[in-house]
Image: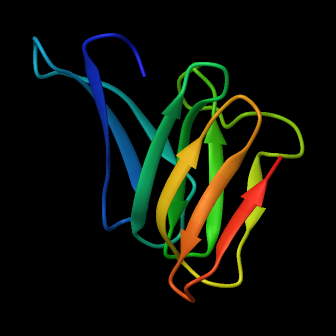
Amino acid sequence: AAAGSVVIGYSDGVLREWDLPSGRRIRTLSGHTRAVLAIAYCPELGVVSAGADKTVRVWTAAPQQRRNGAKNVLRLPAAAACLAATSKFIACGCQDKVIRVFD
């Protein structure tokens, strides 16, 4: 997310980044097939989102693109309720009461 912006997840599975000073939409990130439930930001990774579709997605700074590589889409056995990300790991607290950590 750019400085002075916020990323919001919606029930239709889309994330939108908004410029706070102007109120304009910067970009739309599509990929989740159900509601976005959690969002985290890590400067090294970018925006990380978890959805009711039981996936975690890592998005690049480039508009309309997901991050390439193995961490593009992580599959979960249950929908995520919370999310944390650093340059070394992504942690998801899932609705089945298990915390899963991916490196």
Residue 30 lies left or right of residue 4; in this view the side is right
Q: Position of residue 92 (x, y in %)?
A: 60, 62
Q: Position of residue 81 (x, y in %)?
A: 45, 71
Q: Nearer the viewer, residue 30 or 61?
A: 61
Q: Position of residue 79 (x, y in %)?
A: 54, 78
Identify which residue is drawn at 74% across, 59% down.
Answer: 101
Task: Give the colour scheme shown.
Answer: rainbow
Q: Position of residue 58 (x, y in %)?
A: 65, 42
Query: Which residue occupies the extreme right position in the image?
Result: 70
Identify which residue is drawn at 79% across, 54% down.
Answer: 102
Q: Quadrant of the N terminus?
A: top left
Query: Which residue occupies the extreme left position in the image?
Result: 22
Residue 47 lies left or right of residue 76; in this view the side is left
Q: Nearer the viewer, residue 66 or 48?
A: 48
Task: Determine whether 39 is above or below 37 in the image.
Answer: above
Identify which residue is drawn at 50% across, 84% down.
Answer: 95
Residue 25 lies left or right of residue 23; in this view the side is right
Residue 87 lies left or right of residue 64; in this view the side is right
Query: Could you tell me how many numbered marks the image carries?
Result: 0
Picture quadrant where residue 61 is located: top right
Identify which residue is drawn at 40% across, 69% down.
Answer: 35
Task: Determine whether 60 is above or below 50 in the image.
Answer: above
Task: Determine whether 91 is above or below 69 in the image.
Answer: below
Q: Nearer the viewer, residue 63 or 94?
A: 94
